[in-house]
Image: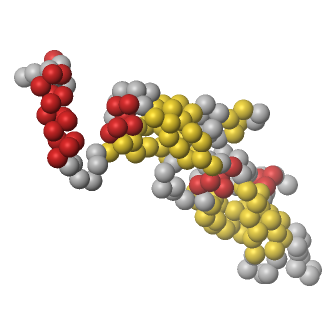
Amino acid sequence: MIGLAPDAVYNMDVDFLDAANGATRRVTMPDGVVFDIKIPLVSRQGKCPSQRQGQSRPRQGSTRRRAMILIAINDHPLFKREGDIISLELPVALHEAVLGASVEVPTLTGTVRMTLPKGTQNGQVLRLRGRGIKKGATAGDILVRARIVMPDKVDDELTAFFEGWQKQHAYNPRQSAEFKS
């Protein structure tokens, strides 16, 4: 029966985490038939694989009907998918970047602690191994990009500290050949 055209095609929005972790959704067809659809792990936009297509009961005097479900995966506010890699931007406080810190990081299945090394740079990418999309018995990684965030208000104490620090440790990050005309 695989390869036969479906009798009906339906669209289904799926949450990002359901597509990443796998889920089961209950579907009610227009004729009232209810069945469960298994959202396979690592679903991509498009049709649900044929072995997962829902089949509804035949109406009296008709043959069994097939329904194809087209999956549209909703965006997630934190996670981005690039192939089988999950990435996210992590806001990092200035003091955490300078001193290093143990911070909480969201993953597909909950929150974990990650160590930011001392001197973490803005845009630096850190890897959480095995916390991404499952691939058989293993799981992919999550790439965490540090985004250093200044405090909402720079107070006099922070200003005085950096004025004193600058006198002793002045540097210009734009001195590379790329920024010289």
Q: Is residue 99 left or right of residue 70?
A: left
Q: What x and y, as percent, mark residue 78?
A: 48, 51
Q: What x and y, as percent, mark residue 125?
A: 44, 31
**Image mark count:** 0
Tell me if residue 148 comes above or below residue 167 in the rendering: below
Q: Is 175 or 154 nearer to us in this picture?
A: 154
Quadrant of residue 28 within the rendered picture: bottom right
Q: Is 46 or 108 nearer to us in this picture?
A: 108
Q: Is residue 63 left or right of residue 150?
A: right
Quadrant of residue 147 within the rendered picture: top left
Q: Quadrant of the C terminus?
A: top left
Q: What x and y, as percent, mark residue 3?
A: 77, 52
Q: Residue at the spot x=78%, y=81% of the render?
A: 31
Q: Residue at the spot x=55%, y=59% of the render?
A: 74
Quadrant of residue 61 within the rendered picture: bottom right
Q: Is residue 101 visible?
A: yes
Q: Residue at the spot x=63%, y=38% of the render?
A: 131
Q: Is 128 or 141 nearer to us in this picture?
A: 128
Q: Is residue 58 left or right of residue 170?
A: right
Q: Residue furthest right?
A: 61
